[in-house]
Amino acid sequence: IVVWTLTRIWETPAVVTLLQVLVALLLFVLYLRRMRNLGVPAWLAGTAVLLFGLLPGTASATVTFNVTTAQALAAMWLFVEALEMAAGPVRYLGRWAAVLRLGCALGAVALLDHAGIVIVGMVGIGFAVALRRHARLLARPVLVAAGVFVAVQIPVFEIAGVDRLVVP
């Protein structure tokens, strides 16, 4: 759906690659900020991002035009949100902006990966175990994720004729 929309604006696969690079850049910046908020020295967080960016798989996957890149970016977004939640889960889950981001990240993983619902379920169980005293706070991001999933899965996929049962 995103690819179709982007190619209506600019009819070339380059627009998708450009978007993937920009999203990866944004996620790396958010990762750096989250690591600094957790107390990691700037040089160490920066070195980690630099080394990850220099991995051959990172560069080639970011500019590759396929579905696994979108899946990886959604999973990276979920990881970045989990990092912020690790710093203070009760405070994090008490803010609606954070709840919306986490819910949208969970929804993106569920939508973009053929096993996304299973992955989100496993992550949710992990969050519930880690936050067992405050597990009720996870209800809001789960509801947001379900809303994102249903809002895209049902009308948009039906209109576009996406067959979710076919594995490429």
Image (tube, rainbow, N blue to C red):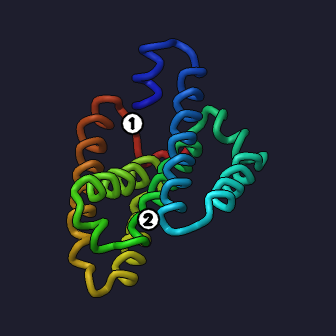
Of badges 1 and 2, the one in the foreground is 2
Residue shown at the point (59%, 37%) measured from the top left: 66
Element marked by disc 2: helix
- Give above or below for 16 relative to 101: above
Residue 29: image location, x then y, percent: 54, 46
Q: Can residue 54 be seen in this view?
A: yes
Q: In which quarter of the image is the C terminus?
A: top right
Residue 39: image location, x then y, percent: 53, 68
- Give above or below for 79 relative to 168: below
Image disc number at residue 91:
none
Quickly name the residue at label 1.
162
Task: Look at label 1 and name its amino acid.
Answer: Val
Residue shown at the point (47%, 52%) measured from the top left: 77
- Nearer the observer, 114 or 40: 40
Element marked by disc 1: loop
Q: Is residue 119 visible?
A: no
Count of labels in the image: 2
- Nearer the observer, 107 or 76: 76
Q: Earlier in the sequence, mark 1 or mark 2?
A: 2
- Quick one: label 2, few (<14), some, or many (20+) residues within 10 Å? some
Residue shown at the point (27%, 87%) measured from the top left: 133
Residue shown at the point (22%, 66%) measured from the top left: 94
Left or right, 93 with reference to 121: left
Quickly name the residue at label 2.
82
The answer to whether marks 1 and 2 mark residues whose Cβ atoms lie closer than 8 Å is no
Task: Look at label 2 and name its amino acid.
Answer: Ala
Q: In which quarter of the image is residue 121?
A: bottom left
Left or right, 51 with reference to 147: right
Residue 42: image location, x then y, percent: 62, 58
